[in-house]
Image: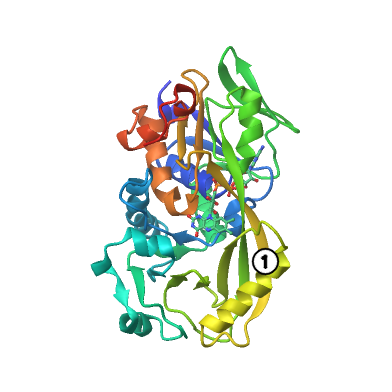
Amino acid sequence: MGATEKHMMVVGAGIMGASIAYHLASRGIKVTVIDKGQPASGATGSSFGWIHTTVSDDAPDALLRRASVADWRRLAKELPELWVNWTGALSYDDFSLESQADDSLLRQPGISQLEPALNNPPQRAYYAQQDGAVDPIDATRVLLDKACRLGATLKSQTAVIGFTREGNKITGIETPEGVLQADCLILACGTGISPLLDAIGTPLPIMASPAILLRFGATGHVVNTLISGHDIEVRHARNGDILAVEDYPATGGIDDIASDTLAAMKIALTGTESAQLLSQSVGQRPVPADGCPIIGFIGDTTGVYVAVMHPAVTCAATLGRMISEELVTGKALDMLENYRPARFSSGQGCT
Ligand SMILES: Cc1cc2nc3c(=O)[nH]c(=O)nc-3n(C[C@H](O)[C@H](O)[C@H](O)COP(=O)(O)OP(=O)(O)OC[C@H]3O[C@@H](n4cnc5c(N)ncnc54)[C@H](O)[C@@H]3O)c2cc1C
């Protein structure tokens, strides 16, 4: 059977599943996307949306991250409704300062020129001019809408609870409403993947790492870029609100984090004096145990392809393109070889 005759089923309508579905549908593949809730109801719905390319050269996902800007720019051309805000990112956390050559860093006068609202501009900061941000919920919607216009089917409120098989091959999914057959199954369901992999009998070490997205009402334009420092990590949303992101606290509650973040923002930025918390949400980031993406078929004969990583908003545009290429042509891409699920059983690791 040729790839274009196959029925491919994507489990998960987060940014990863949406991008894979869009790229497959663009190549004429029959695709069904299944989600137990609504699109972007997983980590994607709480994401900060930073297309974040700053990694050290030896990071295992460095090539993937650096390809991401070109792929998001391509998507923005293909999908005019897709909003990507190419403001660049100004970072002065320890990692960004240590991972960049000193002569590539901005000094205080340049920082103040770029971000006049910073009350205590740091001595040095790294400006990643190429970085941008998307609204992850909206981007997911745009990708899925286009996939559906190209012939894909979206089934929301449909949980995958088991699988049908013939020998080792998974032939379909079980849902509370019945069985759906597929020639190829793509698991792009974030932290929801672990029980499904257990049911198939090929568990993979994927952790759930909680983080908090905070939305503040602001009275005007405050920051020009995305700012990521030891004190604040903020950017404007498309409607002018200020978004901030924080790791989930080991102790204390989310309300404490929200008020501490608001206080830190008011100290750091002129123009946020009257800012108020509008909403807060916690998302579970899917983090493979070795920190590397997990991309590829599990086993040789299962017909099940896994696509899980963090940070997936950054890499979704690139991975959607590459994964669809592998699935349609049947040819493995060199750039993804490092990320295969088999590394956990072979002990080979991700380099
Ligand atoms: C606060 C916060 C800030 C972040 N900031 C950034 C950032 O700035 N940049 C970045 O790149 N990344 C960021 N991330 C990480 C990023 O959001 C995630 O890596 C990404 O959203 C994961 O996308 P996904 O599609 O793989 O998974 P998810 O978005 O979790 O989607 C999985 C989907 O699968 C569905 N599902 C699960 N189980 C089943 C089942 N059994 N049957 C059917 N459907 C199922 C779920 O309902 C869900 O919709 C952030 C995350 C958080 C929480």
Of the pair 275 and 267, the residue shown nearer to us: 267
Q: Position of residue 256 (x, y in %)?
A: 70, 69
Q: Is residue 177 left or right of residue 166?
A: right
Which residue is outermost to the left?
Answer: 103
Q: How is the image coloured?
A: rainbow
Res 91 quadrant in image: bottom left
Q: Position of residue 268 (x, y in %)?
A: 52, 81
Please tell me whether residue 23 is drawn above or below residue 299 in the rendered image.
below
The reply to whether residue 33 is visible in this rendering is: no
Secondary structure type for disc 1: strand
Which residue is outermost to the top?
Answer: 167
* Residue at the image point whose x is 41% and y is 60% from the top: 95
* Residue at the image point whose x is 57% and y is 49% from the top: 14
Q: Is residue 276 left or right of residue 308?
A: right
Q: Amino acid at mark 1?
A: Gln
Please tell me whether residue 22 is drawn above or below residue 84 in the rendered image.
above
Q: Position of residue 324 (x, y in %)?
A: 41, 38
Please give the residue where the numbered disc 1 appears in the rendered image. Answer: 280
Which quadrant would the C terminus be assigned to in this image? Answer: top left
Which residue is outermost to the right?
Answer: 176
Which quadrant would the N terminus be assigned to in this image? Answer: top left
